[in-house]
Image: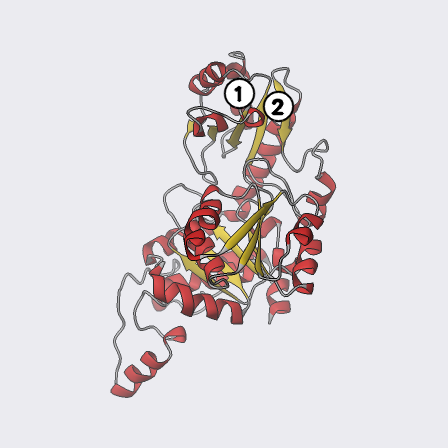
Amino acid sequence: MQNLKQKRDISEILHHLGEENLPFNAMSPPIFQTSIFSFDSYEDYQAALADETHSFLYSRGNNPTVNLVEQKIAALEHGEQAKLMSSGVAAISAAVMAFVKTGDHIISIRDCYTWAKTLFTTYLGRFGVEHDFVDGVDPQDFAKAIKPNTKIIYLESPTSLTFKIQDLTAIAKIAKDNGIKTIIDNTWATPLYQNPIDHAIDIVVHSASKYFGGHSDLVAGVIIGNKSDMLQIYKQEFLNIGHVPDPFMAWLILRGMRTLQVRLRQHNAGAQLIAEFLEKHPKVESVCYPFLSSFPQNNLAKSQMTGGAGLFSFRVKSHNVEKIKQFVNSIKVFKRAVSWGGYESLIYANAISYVENIPEDRISLIRIHIGLENPQLLMDALNDALTCL
């Protein structure tokens, strides 16, 4: 079954998979905006209650609109099953919590998403789950951190601020040799440009708020894995905690996925062009984009991914916070907002996260998301704002 999924054309998955028998021959799949489902008989009712995993009983468990999106995303990621969640952090939390208990140990990439880090340091710490953070550029960083009680290695490749890459194949082998589950946040590359399951990673998570949705109008997450792992996540975390995805939100994701290939090509081309422009700019110290030839892990990036997203960071030649504020406040076209992955271009200065005591190596770090605007318009806006420095 997995090999069949791997051979499917991406556009066939996005536009046709699971849509063979839509009610009334509808062109757009209907939104099943219902909380419950009824039954024709006592026996049918009883059978559904006995097998909520595979039944339409209550939309907290299954819903046709939600399940259609899950089917498509599982196929895109070369996984057996997917589970849509109410947010990206809900997906991360459920995937991790399903496989740890008090006394267990997690190894995580140091530069992971802030709320993933909070999950390890604060939430799970309350229940006696240990953790260690490693740089992760060298796979041996993980090997050296393994303890007898290590249950999970958590990855994010590339990381979403410094864009460091982990060698997925090497890390997966280390984990499997030691009976450790691997989980990766693959939001940046999307399944169009990277398929971690093909590198023997166990579980993939995404913030579907980003490129799957693509329009900055929804919040969602998704987990992909094999049937056994997904059943454990579904029964142990999803049904119990209730990270319920709304049917309308699922429909918005489905709508966004129709243009995923087209949007990613534009994000990719624009980001590459602007990263090269910034790399040559006299006010820029360095650019963190995996597909620049100057990027330290460029060869690894090209071996694991077939393209890049619109998000990257760069360091300006200034450690003056007031100057950086002036740069951010003066820039045109780019929106000053969190998140990324939508049609619009965004800017975030790392210094914003600190009121005082900003780490010296992070003061000059600026993260931008290249949207679908004309790249020349964006380069002009950056060039004008950089004169502040």
In the picture shown, does residue 278 fall above or below 297?
above
The picture places residue 81, in percent across and down from the top left corner, at 51, 66
Q: Which residue is label 1 attached to?
A: 382
Task: Find the distance from the CA under tag 1 to the CA under tag 2.
Answer: 9 Å
In the picture shown, does residue 385 fall above or below 200?
above
Q: Residue at x 50, y 43 (%)?
A: 113
Numbered mark located on residue 278 in the image? 2
| Nearest the eye: 143 or 304 | 143
340 relative to 31 in the view: left or right: right
Task: Name the residue type under label 1.
Answer: Leu
Q: Residue furthest bottom?
A: 43
Q: Is residue 25 visible?
A: no
| Nearest the eye: 189 or 130 | 130
Task: Name the residue type under label 2.
Answer: Leu
Local SS, label 2 = helix
Quick one: quadrant of the C terminus?
top right
The picture places residue 40, in percent across and down from the top left corner, at 26, 83
Query: Label 2 near label 1: C-beta < 8 Å?
Result: yes
| Nearest the eye: 220 or 345 | 220
122 relative to 192 in the view: left or right: left
Q: How would you rate the neighbour count of disc 1 (Cα within 10 Å): few for under 14, some for 14-19, many for 20 or more? A: many
Local SS, label 1 = helix
Quick one: quadrant of the N terminus?
bottom right
Numbered mark located on residue 314 in the image? none
Q: Residue at x 57, y 49 (%)?
A: 132
How is this picture coloured? Answer: secondary structure
